[in-house]
């Protein structure tokens, strides 16, 4: 209901995410440049807090999402995962007995039912869950030297291939997931995956231009359209089936080998089990 949002509830104690508001635009920056903005349990939790706040604040009409430093998001933090696996444990968000449990992390905009549009300012490479974040942004601006990739099967995980298969040209989705291929900025622009390509130094300004165009529209209509986009991209039965497959794959020896090989900077030796 209008008038019920308390500005003092805006998250201001974030460690891994920068969050600020200017006028009707919210700026969200993943702030772990030392690991190329890779996501771990605690980053997911902070992102979820941000999405929920954006949804509640009636003054926010659009958000711009980017990464600190040279990367947009390097996917999940595999070193963080490997540390838990080495102890025979699951990461907090994958452990059903942990209060932080939320399979997949819970840090995606769709996890929070965010109906405010997002603009991805893709300042550098985005892989794995970083690619998932990009795909959940309705508008996208990409640095001319950035690239997109999946990389889940490279580390013995599944991720969310169904989302890519539904959102992208199918051969492109398969190239990303099955071949661990990369899409350059020009690939993305030619296939309609991004709206604009520009030098890295101009990415934020280009995103702000799109944000101004969004803000000029009716907030009610914009949010209604964004809600339709979000709902039309969901397939609850398929999503749940994929989550279960992801759990199954995560429990395999190959999954543990994939994260070990990543940390040890070697090629994995797959056993198929």
Image: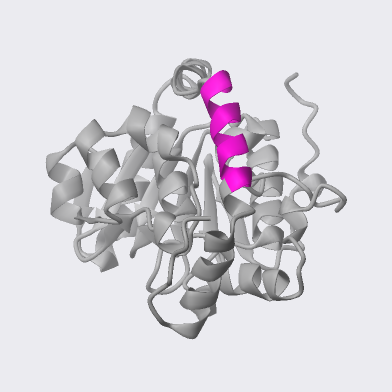
Horizontal side of residue 235 vs 204, given as left or right: right
Horizontal side of residue 33 vs 21, given as left or right: left
The structure residue drawn at horizontal position 52% and vertical position 80%, both measured from the top left corner, is 263
- Between residue 158 and residue 103, name the one nearer to us: 158
Horizontal side of residue 177 vs 106, given as left or right: left
Residue 50, position in %: x, y? 66, 47
Q: Is residue 98 above or below residue 109?
A: below
- Between residue 68 and residue 258, name the one nearer to us: 258
Main SS category, magenta section: helix
- Between residue 190 and residue 160, name the one nearer to us: 160
Q: Is residue 164 above or below residue 44?
A: above
Q: Quadrant of the N terminus?
A: top right
- Between residue 188 and residue 24, name the one nearer to us: 188
Quadrant for residue 58, please give it. top right
- Magenta region includes residue 244: yes
Residue 42, position in %: x, y? 71, 61
How does the figure colour the protein chain or chains? one colour
Residue 141, position in %: x, y? 29, 49
The structure residue drawn at horizontal position 41% and vertical position 46%, both measured from the top left corner, is 134
Quadrant for residue 92, please give it. bottom right
- Magenta region includes residue 264: no
Q: Which range is magenta?
A: 236-248
Q: Is residue 258 above or below residue 41?
A: below
Residue 29, position in %: x, y? 52, 60
Q: Is residue 115 visible?
A: no
The structure residue drawn at horizontal position 56% and vertical position 49%, both measured from the top left corner, is 249
Q: Is residue 22 visible?
A: yes
């Amino acid at each position: 209901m209008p008038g019920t949002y308390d500005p003092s509830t805006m998250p201001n104690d974030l460690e891994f995410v920068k969050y600020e508001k200017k006028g009707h635009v919210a700026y969200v920056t993943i702030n772990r440049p030392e690991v190329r903005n890779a996501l771990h349990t605690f980053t997911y939790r902070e992102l979820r807090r941000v999405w929920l706040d954006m949804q509640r604040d009636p003054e926010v009409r659009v958000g711009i999402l980017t990464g600190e430093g040279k990367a947009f998001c390097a996917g999940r933090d595999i070193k963080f995962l490997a540390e838990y696996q080495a102890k025979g444990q699951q990461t907090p968000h994958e452990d059903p007995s942990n209060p932080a449990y939320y399979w997949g992390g819970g840090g995606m905009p769709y996890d929070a039912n965010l109906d405010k549009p997002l603009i991805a300012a893709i300042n550098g490479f985005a892989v794995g869950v970083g690619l998932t974040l990009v795909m959940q942004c309705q508008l996208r601006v990409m640095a001319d030297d950035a690239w997109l990739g999946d990389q889940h099967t490279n580390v013995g995980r599944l991720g969310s291939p169904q989302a890519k298969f539904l959102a992208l040209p199918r051969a492109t989705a398969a190239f990303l997931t099955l071949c661990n291929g990369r899409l350059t900025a020009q690939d993305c622009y030619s296939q309609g995956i991004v709206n604009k390509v520009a030098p890295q130094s101009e990415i934020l300004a280009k995103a702000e231009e799109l944000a101004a165009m969004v803000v000029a529209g009716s907030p009610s209509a914009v949010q209604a359209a964004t809600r339709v986009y979000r709902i039309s991209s969901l397939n609850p039965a398929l999503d749940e089936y994929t989550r279960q497959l992801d759990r199954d794959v995560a429990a395999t020896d190959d999954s543990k080998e994939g994260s070990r090989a990543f940390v040890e900077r070697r090629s994995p030796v797959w056993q198929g089990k």
